[in-house]
Amino acid sequence: MRQMSRWLPAMLLSALVVGPGCHAKFKKYAPTIESVDVQVLTTGGPSVYLGRLDSGEGLVADIVDTAVNISQAVNEIQVGTRIASAVDIERTNAALEHGFARTLDGGPPFPYVEDGGAARVQLEVLSYGMEAPYLGAQASFKYDIRVRIYKGAERVYSARTTCDTAAGYPSEISQALDLVNNRAQIDALTDEEIQAAFDAVADWCGQEIVRKMRKHAG
């Protein structure tokens, strides 16, 4: 079995989207928060995009594009079903909280406690899955997470983070030619390898969330 650590070097932070004005509010409230606990929610299922073919204008091009893209859509459904069957959501949620808790630890900007924090960090997994930037390119396992902090009933922080890591083990030649078969890459992985990959991305996302949160707290 390949170890989870094999996925870590390829990890990239793809995007961070933050609501307007929330940094100033968070900077104001962060020093008043004595501790935080964490709630992890998964509200979305697997999302898969493997790219589409666009051969240009013309009847023949349209026919070819339609045939290939229908096949891609079918592949996406099948890959999404495979990911859903392989991934234990409770385990990946625990990995996300573990990465967050271990990194935040005693602070700054405030310490983590398992239960009964003065404020709550809500980590909402909006989607997880697999995405390729274009047809034939190496796909990535991906997480899209919305981060919110509540002090009582008031929301004092909101951000959105997307993390990903390379999916599968395509040959160097396939990568060089942009001929990676992402469906075959998934088929070649065991359920435990898929699970370990998503656990690794979730744990790393927890770490990145803390790093950004510290930056936003000033």
Image (cartoon, helix red, strand yellow):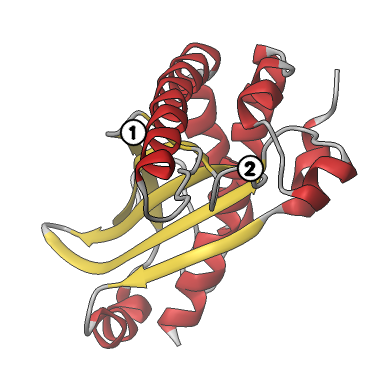
**Foreground pick, 196 / 130:** 130
- Which class describes the residues within 10 Å of circle 1: few (<14), some (14-19), or many (20+)? some
**Foreground pick, 183 / 88:** 183
> Is residue 109 visible from the viewing direction of this image?
no
Residue 170 percent location from the top left of the image: 80, 36
**Foreground pick, 149 / 7:** 7
**Extreme residue in the front direction:** 59
Quadrant in the picture for residue 157: bottom left
**Foreground pick, 191 / 184:** 184
* Residue under numbered circle 1: 42
Residue at the image point whose x is 37% and y is 80% from the top? 31
Q: Whole-Å distance between the Cαs marked 1 and 2? A: 30 Å
- In the rendered picture of this protein, how many numbered marks are placed on residues? 2
Asked if the residues shown at circle 1 and circle 2 are in contact, with their CB atoms under 8 angstroms apart, the answer is no
Residue at the image point whose x is 27% and y is 88% from the top? 24
18 is higher (above) or lower (below) than 208: below
Amino acid beneath label 2:
Gly
- Secondary structure at badge 2 equals loop
Quadrant in the picture for residue 28: bottom left
Residue at the image point whose x is 54% and y is 50% from the top? 134
Residue 90 percent location from the top left of the image: 46, 22
116 is higher (above) or lower (below) than 214: above
Q: Which mark is residue 98?
A: none
Residue at the image point whose x is 53% and y is 63% from the top? 14
> Is residue 138 visible from the viewing direction of this image?
yes
Q: Which mark is residue 136?
A: 2
- Image check: 166 left or right of 132? right
Quarter occupied by the N terminus: top right
Amino acid beneath label 1:
Thr
- Image check: 43 left or right of 128? left
Quarter occupied by the C terminus: bottom left
Disc 1 versus disc 2: nearer the observer: 2
